[in-house]
Amino acid sequence: MQPSRDISRLNEIMAALRTPETGCPWDLEQTFATIAPYTLEEAYEVADAIERGDVANLREELGDLLLQVVFHARMAEEEGRFDFGDVVDAITRKLIRRHPHVFGDARNLASHEVKALWGRIKAEEKRERAEARRAAGLPAEEATGALADVPLALPALTRALKLQEKAGKVGFDWNDPRAVLAKLREEIDEVEAELDANDARRVAGEVGDLLFAVANLARHLSVDPEAALRGANAKFERRFAHIETRLAEAGRAPGGATLDEMEALWDEAKRREKTGP
């Protein structure tokens, strides 16, 4: 089988991999549940390539992510539920419906008007899904509140942001980032209080509240907390690598250095980032 730029060839390859007796044993063992973690991982690798500005790698990672869509669609087709064409049809219908300012009569809208329109259309779609479920005799979706459609499977930091955004849309929010800063200081004080009480379970709870407040501060400052944390991770890796390099020049390793020595090298790395070598 030859490679191709045609999406149909990718579907053919996936079908061959999932063909009993002649397909790939590993691919044949997979289910929606076992593939889901890989789908999340590939999405993160796309984000990582973007963060690094690696366009060549981005092309490859987007292909890996597309494979995940094809894999899920193939398993659904085998069960007689839907196929890849249905996936494409669903998203094209959604995009056309949610962009009447492009494909319909709602023209010349400002960005904030587009966002409001998008929200109204999504609400209409949710009502229609609920009506369709009732008409089919199916139970209503479990949750119906303002936070109902925030997926549980999202990474905790991303889900915190989504929950806050949803609550903010119904007025449960601060108007000033400084109010969030005050809340952040309050949460730090509560962590310290539980440390003094030596209650590990309550400390964990307060640390969770602190992280939630940090995500909220990022949202109010229009900072993507996931991207900000990835940047902080990369910064930590760079500076720690500097510590290792400088110690190695003296024939030493971090395990044989004092904390004061490593902190001095850390500060040196920070200065170099600001002024250059």
Image (tube, rainbow, N blue to C red):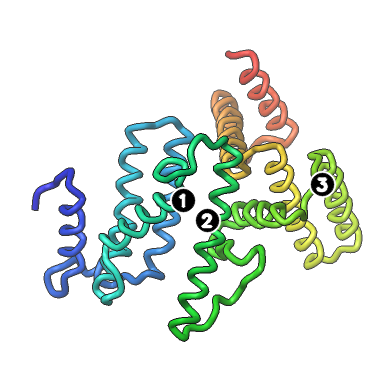
Q: Amino acid at mark 1?
A: Arg
Q: Which residue is rendered at x = 43% and y = 83% of the image?
A: 136
- The image position of residue 93, as x and y in percent, is 37, 55
- Decide: few, some or many residues near mark 3? Use Cα within 10 Å; few <14, some 14-19, many ≥20: many
Q: Which mark is residue 218?
A: none
Q: Which mark is residue 98?
A: 1
For discs 2 and 3, the disc positioned in front in the rendered view: 2
- The image position of residue 218, as x and y in percent, is 69, 41
Q: Amino acid at mark 2?
A: Ile
Q: Which residue is mark 3?
A: 184
**CB under 8 Å between discs 2 and 3:** no
Pointer 1 or 2: first along the chain:
1
- Disc 3/disc 1 C-alpha distance (Å): 37 Å
Q: Which mark is residue 121?
A: 2
**CB under 8 Å between discs 1 and 2:** yes
Pointer 3 or 1: first along the chain:
1
Q: Which residue is rendered at x = 51% and y = 34% of the image?
A: 108
